[in-house]
Amino acid sequence: MYESKRLSFFRQTIRPSVKRYLTFAACRITFPLVIRSFRNRALRRYFEAGDPSGLSVPNVARVGRMLCAVAAAARPEQVNLPGFYWHPLQGEARWTIRVTGNWRITFAWDGADAVAVDLEDYH
């Protein structure tokens, strides 16, 4: 009985009679995109406008995640994420990440920007 009186006392003192509201201000932070150029028009349209109509890959959402990773990276090595199967191409200054079994996103790097981003069918 003593515990129940004690709990009710705490409940009354903890609950203020004044209601408090939290307000949030909308804030938009923009970052410069580091993808400067595309080789594939459909890939560019998907990245800029979200229109997947020209892409011929089965998993468009995965392409979007990969493009976001390339756009957020400051160096090519930062795209080496689990499941992306990142590797440099031999003989060229280009890198690739695997979208599906035979589709790859390839890109070159110039300073802090990705250039010539392309969606290629390897087979």
Image (cartoon, rainbow, N blue to C red):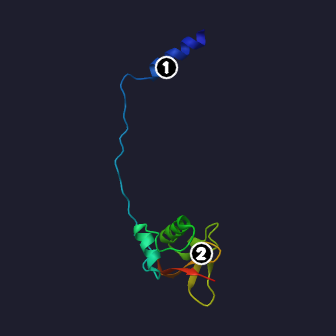
Which image quadrant is residue 41 in? bottom left
**Residue at mark 1 to residue at mark 2: CA–CA distance:** 57 Å
Which quadrant, please, contains the N terminus?
top right
Instruction: Work out whether 25 lies above or below 106.
Output: above
Type of amino acid at the residue the image marks with label 2: Ile
Residue at coordinates 57% horizontally, 13% vertically from top-left? 4
Q: Nearer the viewer, mark 1 or mark 2?
A: 2
**Badge 2: residue crowd in 10 Å (few <14, some 14–19, many ≥20):** many
Q: Which residue is mark 2?
A: 97
Between 8 and 45, the one lying in front of the other is 45
Residue found at the very far bottom of the displayed protein: 91
Type of amino acid at the residue the image marks with label 1: Arg
- Residue 36 - label: none
**Residue 91 on image: x %, y %:** 61, 91
Which quadrant, please, contains the C terminus?
bottom right
Between 46 and 4, the one lying in front of the other is 46
Mark 1: secondary structure: helix
**Residue 110 on image: x %, y %:** 47, 82
Q: Which residue is mark 1?
A: 11
Residue at coordinates 38% horizontally, 63% vertically from top-left? 30
